[in-house]
Image (spheres, rainbow, N blue to C red):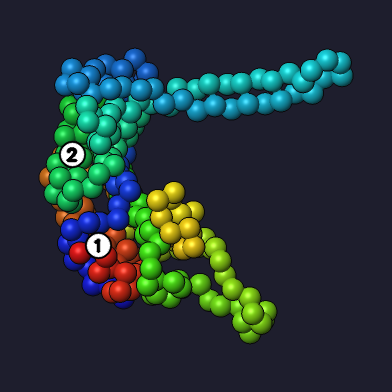
């Protein structure tokens, strides 16, 4: 099991912090007005839609295809394309594609939170969460899952002699955590990128830590919960990896 520590090159592909609110449900036009605050600073706004398609068969001719397009929200992208903010009727999320530090992510989250609260005037925060998607690339010296993971997939030799596990995906639902948090920990194999060792398997470690609450909508009142959330996220991530693989990111 690796020890939690600051990493010089963390394998984080994306980090997201999200807040949900009570007493508000912004409509499309209101969300567009909120996004204009970011656009004035050079951010690019894009609408988010969901699509539902139904194919209805008919006795003659071609099947009838019915498509429904619903507005979900807006995301705004920073001028350098690295940071994002997701705006929905009762929630806001701050995300980054290039993780620098927890402190930088919290400052990004604070700005997004306070702008949403100032515009929407919610009555309380009813949920907060953070999701970190980490990708462990294959490389020489780490040839088996046990070289990387503290809890590798269990071999099937007893039941199927000679059988090996080449790919896997597992999902842990974790409850009873400090501060009434819960978590989803998903670990699985992914295809190697074109510039990586084709003979190896990459791994994704996806940690999603969340909590339901009812707190006055002031960012500083969330500080203790955010510290707890970070601690849980670190324990899930570092506790999944061997010290051998962590040397690559220090």
Whole-percent x and y of residue 167? Answer: 54, 63
Classify the position of the C terminus by image quarter. Answer: bottom left
> Which is nearer the eye, 216 or 54?
54
Percent across and percent down for residue 225 are: 21, 54
Height in image: 242 above or below 218? below
Within 10 Å of the Cα at label 2, are there few (<14), some (14-19), or many (20+) other Cα atoms?
some
Give whichever of 150, 66 is nearer the camera: 150
Per the model, the C-alpha gap separating discs 2 and 1 is 24 Å
Describe residue 224's horizontal placement relative to residue 195 as left or right: left
x 26%, y 16%: residue: 33
In depth, the one of 4 and 184 nearer the eye is 4
| Label 1 CA crowd tier, 10 Å (few <14, some 14–19, many 20+) | few
Of the numbered discs 2 and 1, the one sitting upstream in the chain is: 2
The residue where tag 2 is placed is 108
Q: Quadrant of residue 149?
A: bottom left
Q: Position of residue 202 (x, y in %)?
A: 43, 59
Residue displayed at 18% across by 51% down: 102
Q: Is residue 36 above or below residue 238?
A: above
Identify the residue at horizontal 19%, vertical 21% (top origin): 42
Q: Is residue 205 visible?
A: no
Q: Nearer the viewer, residue 117 or 163?
A: 163
In the image as oriented, which residue stretches furthest toward the right?
A: 59
Q: Is residue 228 left or right of residue 136?
A: left
Disc 2 or disc 1, which is closer to the eye?
1
The residue where tag 1 is placed is 249
Picture layout, residue 171 above or below residue 194: below
* Disc 2 secondary structure class: helix
Q: Is residue 107 visible?
A: yes
Query: What residue is drawn where x is 34% and y is 55%?
Result: 134
């Amino acid at each position: 099991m690796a020890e939690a520590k600051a990493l010089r090159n963390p394998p984080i592909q994306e980090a997201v912090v999200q807040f949900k609110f009570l007493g508000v449900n912004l409509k499309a036009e209101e969300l567009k007005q909120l996004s204009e605050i970011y656009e004035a600073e050079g951010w690019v706004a894009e609408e988010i839609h969901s699509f539902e398609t139904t194919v209805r068969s008919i006795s003659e001719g071609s099947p009838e295809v019915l498509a429904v397009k619903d507005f979900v929200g807006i995301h705004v992208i920073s001028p350098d394309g690295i940071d994002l903010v997701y705006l929905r009727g009762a929630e806001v999320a701050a995300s980054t594609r290039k993780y620098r530090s927890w402190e930088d992510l919290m400052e990004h989250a604070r700005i997004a939170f306070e702008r949403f609260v100032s515009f929407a005037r919610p009555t309380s925060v009813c949920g907060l969460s953070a999701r970190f998607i980490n990708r462990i690339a294959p490389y020489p010296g780490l040839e088996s899952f046990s070289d990387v993971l503290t809890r590798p997939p269990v071999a099937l030799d007893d039941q199927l002699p000679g059988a090996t596990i080449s790919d896997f995906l597992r999902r842990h639902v974790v409850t009873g955590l400090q501060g009434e948090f819960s978590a989803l920990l998903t670990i699985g194999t992914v295809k190697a990128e074109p510039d990586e060792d084709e003979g190896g398997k990459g791994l994704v470690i996806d940690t999603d830590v969340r909590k339901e609450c009812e707190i006055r909508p002031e960012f500083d009142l969330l500080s203790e919960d955010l510290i707890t959330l970070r601690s849980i996220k670190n324990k899930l991530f570092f506790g999944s990896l061997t010290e051998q693989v962590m040397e690559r990111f220090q």
